[in-house]
Image (tube, rainbow, N blue to C red):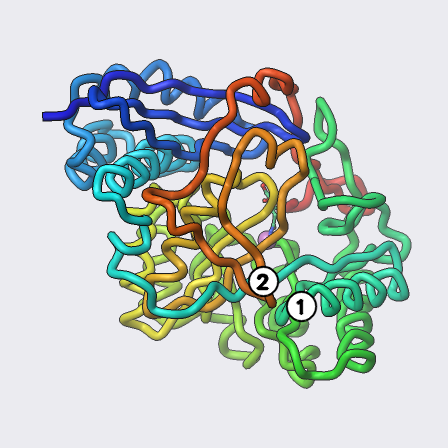
Amino acid sequence: MSTIEKAEVLVTSPGRNYVTLRITTSDGVTGLGDATLNGRELSVASYLRDHLVPLLIGRDPARIEDTWQYLYKGAYWRRGPVTMTAIAAVDTALWDIKGKVAGLPVYELLGGRSRDGVLVYAHASGGDVPALLDDVARLREEGYEAIRAQTAVPGVPGTYGVHSGAGIYEPARTSLPEEQAWSTEAYLDHAPTYLEAVREKFGFGFHLLHDVHHRLTPIEAARFGRAVEPLRLFWMEDPTPAEDQEAFRLIRQHTTTPIAVGENLTSIWDVQHLITERLIDYVRTTVVHAGGITHLRRIFDLAHLYGVRTGSHGAGDLSPVTQAAAVHVDLAVPNFGIQEHMGHTPHTADVFRSDVSYADGMLHPSDAPGLGVEYDDEAAARFPYEPRYLPVARRLDGSVHDW
Ligand code: EZ4
Ligand code: CO
């Protein structure tokens, strides 16, 4: 029997921090799992190094489900982002190994392709409406069929989701949390107008998305959803803080704008009522933060039963290992909806050599065995860890708001 011989926790910062678990078997097969938890990276590194790696050595790498149950039930302390990200890293690495041992890409192990490619949405943003419209035009030219639109809110410096200069949007920029301002009133006045400007200029022949990023109360979210109904959004994302599942009942009673939630939810229990009461349309849980491929598949199967489709988180803080794993899952599940695609910096691509490819608005996985991602240790060593935090939001009166 092959056994797990080594499990290394690799930390690198090629533009932002990533934590990766690399498992090596006694047969010399390696598997990768993403373990990145934005702004809390070293907690997961410690959870793995100090608590999980000693349990992995000598185990049978083929027993993915048993290892998952052992790490989840065997900890007594369940759920939560640190635990679920650490378990996800182990789980993803074991799927990568299983694929390599079988000589098959992971999507084949999950039942094979359900579709030709994975529809993705890209991010358009701007400091003002003309800049946003230019960004949408650029993405339409690149072939994207689905675009998320955000702009700065006038009078409210540092609005979420807007590029600063060229390159990929990256909110975790500073060694202590940056403080940003928030005004719900200004946002509610402004956001519908720029979404309307996008539809006016580019029409209805593509999917338009918007991320509210947990900033509203249920009744405010209901008002927003109703205001944008004529714009036929693909979804409004995270209208209210996601941990309050009941809040969505109120939103649902007032608007037909589809709702997507789940990028910061970590288990099937956190989305249970959202799904079974049909309070959402898309579940955004991901491989890395929701317990790996094994547990994500369980969430997506529950969602399938209730007509809820998938819409996995795919921001830049999810490494190319997660991106590849997500594309394998997306290709296989019957109830796939859409996949977020922000891309990564060129330095990140030097460290994580991934065969995932983009064409005509879709991502395609590699047909290499496993996930199709290799980790370059030499490149990684050039980018040591740097402490970085996500921002904190304050209302105009100085009180802390949800970021
Ligand atoms: O703020 O990934 O839809 N994408 C997002 C992201 C999140 C970050 C948090 O780590 O909301 O940009
Ligand atoms: Co989001």
Query: In percent of the image, x 71 and y 29: which residue is there?
Result: 177
Rendering coords of residue 302 (x, y %): 28, 63
Secondary structure category for the residue under label 2: strand
Secondary structure category for the residue under label 1: loop
Which residue type does callout 2 highlight? Ala
Query: In percent of the image, x 81 and y 82: which residue is there?
Result: 200
Circle 2 packing at 10 Å, graded few (<14), some (14-19), many (20+), is: few
Left or right of residue 71: residue 200: right
Left or right of residue 159: residue 389: left
Query: In percent of the image, x 73 and y 49: which residue is there?
Result: 160
Circle 1 packing at 10 Å, graded few (<14), some (14-19), many (20+), is: some
Which residue type does callout 1 highlight? Gly
Along the viewing direction, whichever of 59 and 200 lies nearer the viewer: 59
Q: Which residue is mark 1?
A: 143
- Asked if one can make out residue 58 in the rendered structure from this viewpoint, the answer is yes
Q: Is mark 2 within 8 Å of ligand 1?
A: no
Which quadrant does the C terminus fall into?
top right
Query: In percent of the image, x 50 and y 32: which residue is there?
Result: 36
Q: Residue furthest left?
A: 1
Q: Is residue 233 above or below residue 62?
A: below
Q: Do the residues under discs 2 and 1 have CB atoms within 8 angstroms? A: yes
User: In the rendered image, which quarter is residue 273 located in?
Assistant: bottom left
Along the viewing direction, whichever of 143 and 294 lies nearer the viewer: 143
- Asked if one can make out residue 298 in the rendered structure from this viewpoint, the answer is no
Q: Is residue 20 above or below residue 276?
A: above
Q: How many marks do you count on the picture?
A: 2
Rendering coords of residue 268 (x, y %): 32, 52
What mark, if any, has residue 359 been given in the picture? Answer: 2
Rendering coords of residue 400 (x, y %): 69, 40
